[in-house]
Image (tube, rainbow, N blue to C red):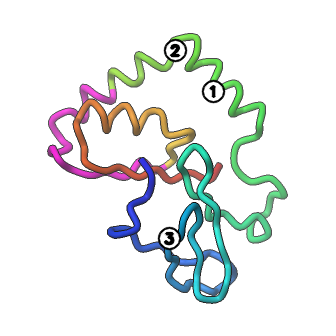
Amino acid sequence: MNPDPATLILRCTVRSCVAPLVATNSRWACAAGHSFDVASEGYLNLLQPHDKHSLKPGDSRNASQARRSLYDAGHFFALQESCVRLLANRIPSPGAFVDVGCGDGALGYAISRACQAARHWGVDLS
């Protein structure tokens, strides 16, 4: 689910800026002019690579493709069903939750649909 500008307060991650980010069209920006584009898949990447030890933080392209291959082969379904069963009565409807370490967001999306959660957010380094 895309971030809801009316209820979400984000801060700029550019070196000590921390100014509030405001949604405009397909990007979020702060008063200092730093901006972050919303990806076509709906996520917002606030990662600043120059602040990390790695030149390429997060999952590699190969790791992302390997995860997608597992999903496409049907191996994701058992995990999804177990998580939905575990959380089905713990997320009120309409409710909200945050999926920390969400990867591509598929699991959070499945849980949100099954639990009829009004909102969910996913946060992931990659």
**Toward the viewer: 35 or 72?**
35
Residue 56 locus on image (x, y percent): 80, 53
The tag on residue 75 is 2
Q: Residue at label 3?
A: 23
Q: Residue at label 1?
A: 67
Q: Is 107 covered by the magenta stretch?
A: no
Q: CA distance from mark 3 to mark 2?
A: 36 Å
Residue at figure coordinates x 34%, y 69% from the top left:
6
Which callout, 3 or 2, points at the residue further toward the start of the chain?
Answer: 3
Residue 19 locus on image (x, y percent): 54, 86
Disc 2 residue crowd, few under 14, some 14–19, many 20+, Cα 10 Å: few
Q: Is 86 covered by the magenta stretch?
A: yes
**Residue 116 as seen in the image, left or right of residue 61:** left
* Residues at marks 2 and 1 touching, judged by CB atoms closer than 8 Å: no
Q: Secondary structure at mark 1?
A: helix
Q: How many marks?
A: 3
Residue type for callout 2 = His
Q: Residue furthest front?
A: 25
Disc 3 residue crowd, few under 14, some 14–19, many 20+, Cα 10 Å: many
Q: Secondary structure at mark 2?
A: loop
Residue type for callout 3 = Ala
Q: Quadrant of residue 45?
A: bottom right
Q: CA distance from mark 2 to mark 1?
A: 10 Å
* Residues at marks 3 and 1 touching, judged by CB atoms closer than 8 Å: no
